[in-house]
Image (cartoon, grey):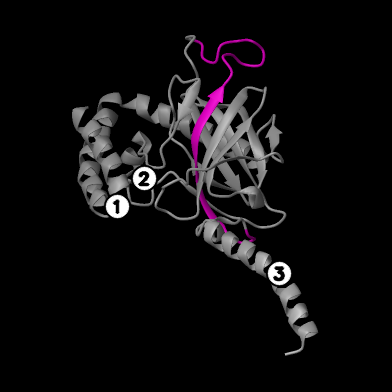
Amino acid sequence: MPEDKLNKQSIWFLILAPLGIIFLGYLFTKDPKEGNQKNTNNSIYTLWIAEAEVAEAKNDGSKWDVDATAPDLSAMVVWKNQVILNTVSSDDSLIGRWDPIAISVGDVIKGEVSTSTVKRIARIRAEKGQKFSIGLFDKDIVSRDYIGGWEIDTTELRPGKCELESDKSLKRLVIAVTQDDDLSIPDKSFKITGASYLEEPDEVMLETVKRWAKEAQEGIKEFSGNVGEEIQKIGDQVDQQRDKLEEVIKETTKKTEDKLRELLESFGDK
């Protein structure tokens, strides 16, 4: 082989060899899950409200509740003009925390306990140009007072814990995000810089709260008409739902099962 040809091959080798080593190093160091966690259009995410922190008083300086207790916090998630998640209330809390598994008294009374209803999660598809909103409320007997919230672009979601902060009434919100239903959150945190703080609830939230208030008022009138009979009815419904809860436990994963057993025991103590 001519000497000049050998020299050219040597030059190309010296150029390409380091590039090849760098590429191989990238492949070996790359997180194998990274490809699954990349935010792509039409990815479906599972999320729930993990934590919320509110100011010590309302914007006008007044206490949250007339008895000077902290607010009873609850959250609502709206996507495509539909309410897709309502949390149970975290009573008397300036910092509320929620699990993805929860059972409310209302679920038991209505007989709506199942493997789907005990999961307090929302599923959202990441689509360009689509947003979803989260609102936090102070839950009272017949109404819910809006505290604050955010509007978020769906394409900004990715697995991990998303933290949003403001100097408003809703000081901090933590959203847990996964891409599956095993409820195991990746050990990653991120912030969404493009989220818009909502000083007022959107139209869907407002209409939902109005409907709840009307239903609550009608329920109180009906309940007060025959208190003894209604209390007995609630007791019977709780007993019936305990059997149903046992069936739900058998159909759920270990993590869900442990949480449900705690809730079932609490029903037994009452």
Q: Identify the mark at residue 78; answer none if there is no mark.
A: none
In the orientation shown, which residue stands out farthest toward the bottom? 1
Which of disc 3 and disc 1 is earlier in sequence?
3
Kind of residue at disc 1: Thr
Kind of residue at disc 2: Val
Which of disc 3 and disc 2 is earlier in sequence?
3
Q: Is residue 42 magenta?
A: yes
- The residue pinned by badge 2 equals 118
**In the figure, 56 relative to 189: above or below?**
above
**In the figure, 194 relative to 46: above or below?**
above
SS at mark 2 in the image: loop
Q: Is residue 117 visible?
A: yes
Q: Identify the mark at residue 252; answer none if there is no mark.
A: 1
- The residue depicted at 38 percent of the width and 52 percent of the height is 116
**Which quadrant of the figure contains the C terminus?**
top left
**Which quadrant of the figure contains the N terminus?**
bottom right
In the orientation shown, which residue stands out farthest toward the front? 3
Which of disc 2 and disc 1 is earlier in sequence?
2
Q: Is residue 175 magenta?
A: no
**In the figure, 80 relative to 224: above or below?**
below
- The residue pinned by badge 3 equals 14
Position of residue 132 measured from the top left corner of the image (x, y, whole percent):
63, 46
